[in-house]
Amino acid sequence: MPQLTLHTPLGEITLSEDEGALVALDWGRGRDQDATPLLREARAQLHDWFDGKRVDFDLPLRPHGTAFQGRVWDVMRAIPPGETLTYGAVAAQLNSSARAVGMACGANPIPIIIPCHRVVAASGRLGGYSGEGGGGTKRFLLRLEAASAGLLAGAPAASPNDPSATSVGEPAR
């Protein structure tokens, strides 16, 4: 399976491709490096996203998961950049439970690109995040995305270790 590692503000992340589609984004360095055209394009889009030059991704994705997980991931991809939904709001759309949605978020094999960071707890807290750095990484991603979407006019640049406020951008729905 072709993989390509890139450096980001969150450290190294590795993209994996299978049959012409992205199937994984993992924290850390991948063992095998193969810069296919798709992986080079994904790397370029991620660099642009981290640099605030884009707010979404245009890449072929094929995340492996159950049919229910796929529906949750589709809802996450429909949340506008810089905004959030609660686990309960996503569950209501799918006639499911917030706990099931949280489990699907945690199983997301392509975080950032499938933006599970946009799903937060009803209390206004961030909730969990399965990526390296947990809640601090989720907070960083939300602040970066909100700033890129123009929702935090004049806000300082986000930092992965910033312990500041947990609510970001538009209120959770």
Image: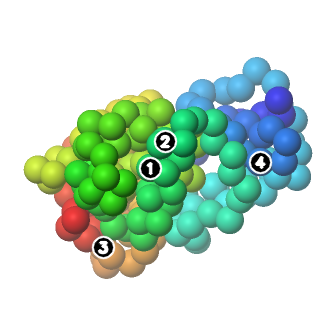
> Cβ–Cβ below 8 Å for labels 4 and 1?
no
User: Which amino acid lies under the numbered mark 4 shown in the image of this protein?
Assistant: Ala
User: Which amino acid lies under the numbered mark 2 shown in the image of this protein?
Assistant: Gln
Of badges 2 and 3, the one in the foreground is: 2
Quick check: 162 above or below 92?
A: above
Return the residue nearer the eye: 126 or 147: 126
Quick check: 134 above or below 44?
A: above
The residue lying at 82 percent from left, 24 percent from top is 32
Return the residue nearer the eye: 89 or 145: 89
The residue under label 1 is 72
Mark 2 and mark 3: Cα distance apart in space: 31 Å
Is residue 4 in sight in this rendering?
no
Mark 1 and mark 3: Cα distance apart in space: 27 Å
Residue 31 locus on image (x, y percent): 76, 21
User: Which amino acid lies under the numbered mark 3 shown in the image of this protein?
Assistant: Leu
Q: Earlier in the sequence, mark 2 or mark 3?
A: 2
The residue under label 3 is 152
Mark 4 and mark 1: Cα distance apart in space: 19 Å
Residue 69 tag number: 2
Q: Secondary structure at mark 1?
A: helix
The residue lying at 47 percent from left, 33 percent from top is 107
> Cβ–Cβ below 8 Å for labels 1 and 2?
yes
> Cβ–Cβ below 8 Å for labels 1 and 3?
no
The residue under label 4 is 21
Q: Secondary structure at mark 3?
A: loop
Mark 3 and mark 4: Cα distance apart in space: 33 Å
The residue lying at 41 percent from left, 65 percent from top is 79
Q: Earlier in the sequence, mark 1 or mark 3?
A: 1
Q: Secondary structure at mark 2?
A: helix
Is residue 58 in sight in this rendering?
yes
Residue 47 locus on image (x, y percent): 64, 56
